[in-house]
Amino acid sequence: TLIIEGNGNMIDYNTDDNLPPWYDYRTLIQDVELPDDITSLGTFAFYQCSNLQTILIPFKITDIPVGLFKDCTSLESIDFLCNLKSIGSGSFSYCTNLINITIPDAVESIGSSAFSYCTSLINITIPAKVTTITSYLFQECEELISVEFFGKVTTIEANAFIGCIRLKIIELPDSIESIGDGTFYECISLKTI
């Protein structure tokens, strides 16, 4: 268990020259305990924690930053106690064991490639406040079968669902104004739009 202490904002990390202090022990981390008084998580904080399975996001967190759980290949579930408003680019990319995730209703934006290569993800519901499906959002989510929209999505950017070979059902809302190039490329099972 990785126990993080303190309050306020966690500093940001990157994959080049500022890795988190626990990075050398990343493969030993199976779960993370975060303090209730933490108000933000750092970019790439849990990058390549390949044995991380579960984490509870505390109430004061409003954003999942860029690359937070990238390459956490054992992450099975994530619980949000918080009033989450945004999910950053690539934040869950290559979480190949993630089957289901419930995106909180308060989420307003989801960054590009946030769930790319989540090859076990089966279903996803897009909350009502999200108006743009960003580029490569679900790239190569090979087990994704259905996508449900609760709100008024106006834009689906390029390659949003590229390579979702088992995607069968997607009901696009009437509010759609534009669909980018390659959005459903290689979606060979798609039967209903």
Image (cartoon, rainbow, N blue to C red):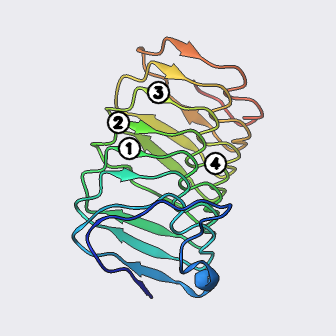
Q: CA distance from mark 1 to mark 4?
A: 16 Å
Give the number of the mark in front: 1 or 4. 1
Give the mark, 2 or 1, whose residue is nearer the N terminus.
1
Cα–Cα gap, marks 2 and 1: 6 Å
Mark 2 in CB contact with mark 1 (< 8 angstroms): yes
Three-letter residue code for mark 3: Thr
Check disc 2: other Cα within 10 Å, few if <14, some if 14-19, many if 20+: some
Secondary structure found at label 3? strand
Instruction: Find residue 31 and report its horizontal and vertical position in percent.
Output: 46, 81
The amino acid type of the residue labelled 4 equals: Ser
Which numbered disc flags the more N-terminal residue, 1 or 3?
1
Pointer 1: residues within 10 angstroms few (<14), some, or many (20+)? many
Alpha carbon distance from label 2 to label 3:
9 Å
Q: Which residue is mark 3?
A: 132
Looking at marks 3 and 4 on the same chain, the residue that comes earlier in the sequence is marked by 4
User: Which residue position holds label 1?
Assistant: 86
In the rendered image, the quadrant that contains the C terminus is top right
